[in-house]
Image: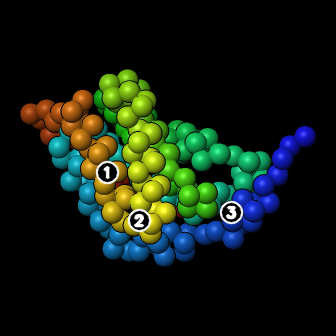
Amino acid sequence: MVSVDFKRILRHLLGGPWQVHRVFGRDGLRRIEQAIAGSERLHAGELRFVVEAALPWQLALRGVSARTRAVQLFSELRVWDTEHNSGVLVYVLLADRDVEIVADRGIDHAAGRAAWEPICREMEASFREGRFDSGAMQAISRIGTLLQQHFPVAQRTIPNELPDPPLVM
């Protein structure tokens, strides 16, 4: 028998992109974009930041987890398709208050899967305290440090392979 979490489904049905703009604001989203662009000048990695207010109702009814959705978006947004296999997706699902990081095989192998979990939990803690902007900035900084350590910028110019603005869904 499948257990249905009606409170979760309701949160997802009532959610929308307006919630993302309420908690991050236009300026906060712009700061995230600038932080990503600044970070990417220091390493050969690529960051993609996605904030989804709520899952589409079909996914919420099926009980899709934030992790499953993050992996799906990692694929759909082609974060895996970078020259050095150093793409990192930061996925925030506001309705579940969940943060997931999905990293391409190059950086995941170099940094280790255990590197991502503390960053996610710190973001979630900041978000619970209402510090969305600072939580996002700290996570981008920590991810950038890992990318800089394992994928230092070469002498050549590194193309920007993924968009820097956060994707709001």
Disc nearer the start of the sequence (1/3): 3
- Residue 51 in the image, given as x and y percentages of width and height: 49, 59
Quadrant in which the N terminus appears: top right
Is 109 left, or right, of 141 in this rendering?
A: right
Give the residue number, with chain letter if any, for mark 3.
Answer: 12
Identify the amino acid type marked 1.
Ile
Identify the amino acid type marked 2.
Phe
* Res. 29 visible in picture: no
- Residue 56 in the image, given as x and y percentages of width and height: 68, 58
Q: Residue at image x 33%, y 74%?
A: 27
Q: Residue furthest top?
A: 109
Identify the amino acid type marked 3.
His
Give the residue number, with chain letter if any, for mark 2.
Answer: 132
Check disc 1: other Cα within 10 Å, few if <14, some if 14-19, many if 20+.
many
Q: Residue at image x 24%, y 29%?
A: 150
Helix, strand or loop under label 3: helix
Name the one closer to the observer, 112 or 60.
112
Helix, strand or loop under label 1: helix
